[in-house]
Amino acid sequence: PWCSAILTAANVLVFLACQIWGNFLYAKGAFSVLYLIRNGEYYRLVTSMFLHADISHLANNLILLYFGGEIVEKTVGKVRYLILFFLSGICGNLLSAVYELTTGSFYESVGASGAVFGLTGGLLYLVVARKGMAAAISMQRMALMVVLSLYSGFQSVRVNNAAHLGGLLSGFLAAFLLCHVGRLPGDRLRRSD
């Protein structure tokens, strides 16, 4: 799973860079809707996905990214996997922006969890579509994993649950669309005999 490994390594390298340059990278890369509205800094929709608040935040996201991502990447291919990852992370941040505007609660957020929840949503779609045959994960086990992940987020303080929900829903929808699109660059031909 090269894409999962590269994304995991990139997150670790950025975290190490943050330990050296500290607040500079957080100030330039964290996400808030205010950065979009006031400054047009749309790049933050992506950069925030590679920043993490502390080592436990990083470890939690990267364990799910690598192991869950590995299953998704092997099932849908590298190109679809990367589309799913980035699209889910961006959509998670966009739902977070809508939440900020709706509630008037503005805050900065960092982390790959919107994208990771997108991979979870993608995996959920694969399990549902293949009736539990994606990596031998049953629908009941997958549903329990999703419920526990969401519950954990809602029970925690300082967690961007809007990004989690946005990532999960967009990941499910993106997996559906990507699995029904024709061949993409990097797809391998499958023999029918």
Image: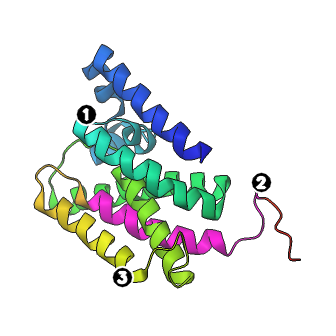
Between disc 3 and disc 1, whose residue precedes? 1
* Sequence-first tag of 1 and 2: 1
Give residue 187's mark: none
Give the crowd class for mark 2: few <14, some 14-19, many >=20 residues within 10 Å: few
Spot occupied by residue 87 in the image (x, y as percentages of width and height) = 51, 56
Q: Which numbered dot is residue 185?
A: 2
Q: Residue 166 colored magenta?
A: yes
Q: Residue at x 38, y 66 (%)?
A: 168
Front: mark 1 or 2:
1
The alpha-carbon separation of the residues under discs 3 and 1 comes to 31 Å
User: Seen from this angle, which residue lies furthest right?
Assistant: 193
Above or below, 112 against 151 in this view is: above
Residue placed most toward the observer, 108 or 174: 174
At 43% from the left and 50% from the top, the residue drawn is 65
Q: Is residue 31 visible?
A: no
Q: Nearer the viewer, mark 3 or mark 1?
A: 3
Residue type at tag 2 = Pro
- Between marks 2 and 3, how big is the CA–CA gap? 34 Å
Asked whether 177 falls inside the magenta stretch, the response is yes
Tell me where the magenta segment starts and ends, as one range. Answer: 162-187
Residue 55 is tagged as 1
**Residue where numbered disc 3 is placed:** 140
**SS at mark 3?**
helix
> Looking at the picture, does residue 77 appear above or below residue 192?
above
Q: Where is residue 93 shown, x and y percent of the image?
A: 36, 53
What secondary structure is the magenta-colored segment mainly? helix
Q: Tell me how many marks there are.
A: 3
Image coordinates for residue 108, horizontal then vertical, percent: 23, 41
Tell me the residue at 59%/56% (across/down): 73
Q: Is residue 109 left or right of residue 39?
A: left
Q: What element does badge 2 sit on?
A: loop
| SS category of the residue bearing label 1 | helix
